[in-house]
Image (tube, rainbow, N blue to C red):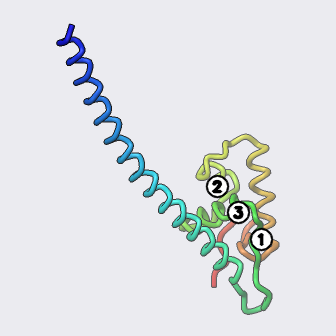
Amino acid sequence: MTSLLDKLADREQAVRTHADSLRVQLAQLTAQISELEAELADLATTRKVLLTLAIDEHDPQPRSLPDNPVYQHILTALADADRPVRAKDLCQVLDLGLESKNIEGMRCKLKRLVARGLIAENEPGLFALCSR
């Protein structure tokens, strides 16, 4: 009976040691995640400030970006594109689905960005960042 209790005690100690090791790893990962989330928040703030402060020579008023983060994603996708893109292409890049309701919603958002002077629609249906 004592050998069974010894085996049980050994197993408990091994599990306890492993659990402690995992707790240390979890604490380290939690700290890393917190740092990355803080950096992401700083980057989002920086993007918003830069886009808000974007000033056109003909329009001395700062351009403001709508609060919805989708607009930031749209502007990032347009910046990454090397050519003007259509609403459908942006829906595909942003994984929004290609249903007509999504494409029309994207087109409305793009038109709002055009109205705010953040992007241009040089040809009907083709959107790109304004050239500086």
CA separation, marks 2 and 1? 15 Å
Q: Earlier in the sequence, mark 2 or mark 1?
A: 2
Residue ID for mark 1: 114
Q: Secondary structure at mark 3?
A: helix
Q: Position of residue 3 (x, y in %)?
A: 17, 12
Label 1 residue SS: helix
Q: Is residue 23 above or below residue 66?
A: above
Q: Secondary structure at mark 2?
A: helix
> Of the numbered discs in the image, which one, if any, rests on residue 71?
3
Image spot of residue 58 (x, y percent): 77, 91
Q: Is residue 34 left or right of residue 64?
A: left
Q: Position of residue 32 (x, y in %)?
A: 43, 57
- Circle 1: residue type: Val
Spatial separation of the CA atoms under disc 3 and disc 1? 12 Å
Observer-nearest of 44 and 78: 44
Q: Is residue 65 above or below residue 58?
A: above
- Name the mark on residue 90: 2
